[in-house]
Image (cartoon, rainbow, N blue to C red):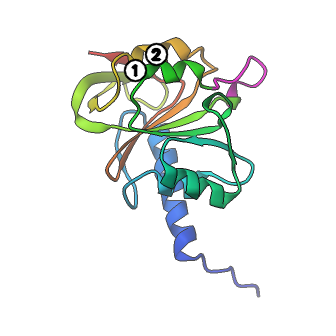
């Protein structure tokens, strides 16, 4: 009989983060708790040496370097850790895939504030009718710039972080500012 290896605390936490992120993307507009605060746990769960990463925060850059990931300009990044995004124009240059490879779009992780700011309604796959919630801390024009970039099935995935909570907005989700 072969015994399965026991996962380390780090592996267990990474699995919890990955599960929370996938849950959030599959249920757009609903919050999911993460094991701790901040984007570093997302780097641990998603990034490896086959990824191209851009980050605004030196701590996230160092964490990504430890994985062996390539540090690149935003337009070449698979994963972008923007922290507190200050300019919505940054969304216009993100990778959104191509006709042949729409899944080659980027994943953007942005700090936000839940229960304040813009009231949003999301519809699309994974949403039972519509979900309404409030998100603040994003630059003016953020949702309009996102809408311009989306050409489903091309587009990018978005994770909004607020403390130890995450909301996922996949490329297939329509976001309406109320």
Q: Residue at x 34, y 43 (%)?
A: 31
In the rendered image, residue 152, in percent from the top left (x then y), is placed at: 60, 17
In the rendered image, residue 47, in percent from the top left (x then y), is placed at: 63, 52
In the rendered image, residue 137, in percent from the top left (x then y), is placed at: 30, 32
- State the residue position of label 1: 142
| Quadrant the C terminus occupies | top left
Tell me the tag on residue 84: none
Q: Residue at x 44, y 42 (%)?
A: 24
Q: Residue at x 64, y 55 (%)?
A: 65
- CB contact under 8 Å: marks 2 and 1: yes
- The segment highlighted magenta reads 95-103
In terms of image quadrants, where is residue 175? Answer: top left
Tell me the tag on residue 145: 2
- Calculate the distance from the C-alpha at mark 2 to the C-alpha at mark 1: 5 Å
Question: On screen, 145 above or below 3?
Answer: above
Q: In this orientation, which residue lies closer to the viewer: 39 or 59?
A: 59
Question: On screen, 17 above or below 151?
Answer: below
**From this viewpoint, which residue is outermost toward the front?**
58
110 in the magenta segment: no
Query: Could you say whether the residue bearing mark 2 is in a helix, strand or loop?
Result: helix
Work out whether residue 63 can be spotted. Answer: yes
Q: In this orientation, which residue lies closer to the viewer: 18 or 23?
A: 18
Work out whether residue 45 can be spotted. Answer: no
């Amino acid at each position: 009989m072969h015994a399965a290896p026991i996962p380390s605390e780090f592996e267990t936490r990474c699995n919890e983060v990955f599960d929370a992120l996938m849950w959030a993307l599959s249920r757009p507009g609903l919050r999911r708790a993460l094991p701790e605060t901040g984007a570093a746990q997302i780097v641990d769960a998603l990034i490896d040496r086959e990824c191209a990463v851009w980050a605004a925060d030196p701590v996230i850059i160092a964490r990504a370097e430890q994985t062996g990931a390539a540090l690149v300009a935003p337009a070449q990044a698979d994963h972008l850790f923007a922290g507190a995004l200050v300019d919505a124009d940054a969304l216009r240059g993100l990778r959104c895939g191509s006709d042949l490879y729409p899944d080659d779009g980027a994943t953007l992780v942005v700090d936000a504030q839940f229960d304040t700011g813009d009231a949003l309604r999301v519809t699309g796959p994974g949403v039972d009718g519509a979900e309404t919630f409030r998100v603040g801390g994003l630059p003016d024009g953020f949702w309009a710039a996102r809408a311009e970039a989306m050409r489903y099935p091309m587009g990018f995935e978005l994770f909004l972080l607020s403390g130890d909570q995450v909301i996922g907005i996949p490329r297939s989700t329509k976001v309406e500012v109320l």
